[in-house]
Amino acid sequence: MIPESVKVAGVVYQVKTVPIVEIDSNRNYQGACRHSETIIEILDSLSDDRKEQVFIHELTHAILNEAGYSEHDEALVERFSVILHQVLKDNGPFFKK
């Protein structure tokens, strides 16, 4: 289950599922981390597993941002977040129904 909010380094990010995720006038996104608004958006038409993966991906961006990194290597974020999703799902109470 994806939480409604998540605290990262003392900052609470609201987690919202939305019908469209738009970044710079491009609507071809599955998720977004809006650092200045402290919101994580996830496309609501995705499967539950994909929503979880996208949530972890955007959470990784939030973590990097709160750690002071303004530039994020998207390939690294993608690879890291896919593995982290698997680790959390298979080894703990995360995303259990």
Image (spheres, rainbow, N blue to C red):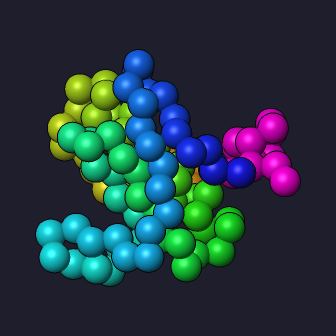
Task: Point out the residue furthest to the top here.
Answer: 10
> Quick one: which residue is furthest to the right in this view?
97
User: In the rendered image, is residue 81 in sight?
Assistant: no
Q: Position of residue 61 (x, y in %)?
A: 36, 44
- Report x, y in % for residue 57: 47, 52
Q: Which residue is at 51% across, 35% downward?
A: 6
Question: Compared to 42, does 14 lie above or below?
Answer: above
Residue toward you, 76 or 89: 89
- Is 95 magenta? The answer is yes
Say above or below: 61 vs 27: above
Q: Which residues are magenta?
A: 84-97
Whether 12 is among the magenta residues is: no
For residue 9, above or below residue 20:
above
Q: Nearer the viewer, residue 14 or 28?
A: 14
The answer to whether 56 appears left or right of 75 in the picture is right
Total marks placed: 0
